Amino acid sequence: MLRAIDIKPDVYWVGGIDWNERNFHGYTTQRGSTYNAYLIVDEHVTLIDTCKGPFADEMIERIAGIIDPARIEYVVSNHVEQDHSGAIPRIMQEAPNATIVTSDPWGERGLRAHYGDDYAYLPVKSGDTLSIGKRTLTFTHAMMVHWPDNMATYSDVDRILFSNDAFGQHFASSKHFDDEVGRDEVLQQAKKYYANIVMPYSKHVRRLLDALADTEIDLVAPAHGIIWRSYIADIMAAYETWASLEPDDYAIVVYDSMWHATEAMALQLVEAFIEEGIPARLFDLKANHVSDIMTEVLSARYIAVGSPSLNNGMMPTVASFLCYLKGLSPRARIGIPFGSYGWKASGPDEVCKGLEACGFELPFGTLTHQWAENEEGLAELDRKFLQKLREVRGERPVAQDDANVTEG
């Protein structure tokens, strides 16, 4: 029998665990995910969110271990997306007299579009409250974190923030709390989630954090992953940092290569960063998924991207990476396009255009190397790159002859 988990007196986790989820909208989820729903047993029994459709029976079995699902009077839908709302039709079969509480107007519009007009809807605005007995629920719109309809729900008696997508992680575990899993593991999973899903909406995260600033919180119960209880201050501080989009003095070098010349350039750039005392990490796109790289983009000031020329353009893997990067809209980054070529530098040039489309600064121009790697050419790349890097960091001026590091 599937069991509910007590998270506070008369408040239960009743969601589903997706042990086998490995891809979420192009983002690799090697640790699976959860679809968290929460049952509050009060004078008016309330379900906070549902779950992905295939996990509906799992959720209902957990609820049935606590109460008859027909007793549910309110279903709070914090977010329309189907991994959260997909079980609404199933739960409404069990609780046909329940009212669906959702954000006004986007939540109601979205739910009607997905599930029709046969249910009773109660649209709420930010700051609205709902008494369910000894508890009062307060709703805070979290618009564009990460859909227009998103909202968070706060239970005053329990001091629980049901935060939906904010503060979540794609992480499946038999444990349900941060201190059971470990701070570093949960924060790393939360960082990957933020980088791949929430980063484009950072200014809206900032508004949500401001709205929650004076809220007394014992538990943060997101819609995916682990519940925060011991490390709430840590995840709030991390969100403050991530939402600022201010990077660390850190570099990543991302590339694909055909005959190792671009690879040799990538290795040389990593060594140059290290020589300057800048931590750096190398990513071969043949060996690393873009969503794992994006976790590092969140912290990196310098993003070097390399491709050789292939068929008058860049490598498809590099084009895919740049497309994904542009969609996530990191800001305040320094882009460094580079690559090798034979008769035309079209690959590196396209990388430059891709980084420019991301809105990055490009003070290095495009670093290129013709034909196969050689010691002399790599030494020259190292010299010019280090000189320009020191100028960019304000360490010393650069001679006019070396100001342009674009070659070929």
Image (spheres, grey):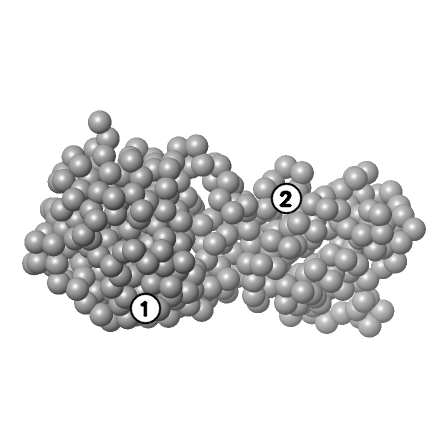
Question: SS for tag 2?
Answer: strand
Query: Amino acid type of disc 2?
Result: Phe
Q: Nearer the viewer, residue 183 or 48?
A: 48
Of circles 2 and 1, which is in front?
A: 1
Q: Along the horizontal axis of the image, is 350 left or right of 242?
A: right
Q: How far across and how far down the image is residue 66, in percent?
A: 14, 38
Please tell me whether residue 3 is drawn above or below residue 9 in the rendered image: above
Q: Residue at x 78, y 55 (%)?
A: 348
Q: Quadrant of the N terminus?
A: top left
Quarter of the image where one finds residue 110? bottom left
Looking at the image, which is closer to me, 401 or 288?
288
Instruction: Give the amino acid type for the residue marked by disc 1 in the picture.
Output: Asp
Left or right of 160? Residue 303 is right
Neighbourhood count class around disc 2 (C-alpha, 10 Å): few under 14, some 14–19, many 20 upward: some
**Do callouts 2 and 1 mark residues in contact (Cβ within 8 Å)?**
no
Q: Quadrant of residue 383?
A: bottom right
Q: Is residue 226 left or right of residue 357?
A: left
Q: Which mark is residue 283?
A: 2
Q: Which mark is residue 104?
A: 1
Q: Quadrant of the C terminus?
A: bottom right
Rendered residue at 25%/44% (across/down): 93
* Disc sitting over residue 9 in the figure: none
In this rendering, the answer to whether 79 lies above or below 127 is above
Please state the horizontal and vertical placement of residue 241, each as a whole percent of the image: 42, 62
Could you say which is closer to the camera, residue 37 or residue 356? 37
Percent position of residue 100, x then y: 25, 57
Q: Nearer the viewer, residue 401 or 229?
A: 229
Q: Is residue 131 visible?
A: yes
Instruction: From this view, report whether residue 105 is shown above or below residue 304.
Output: below
Residue placed furthest toward the right: 343
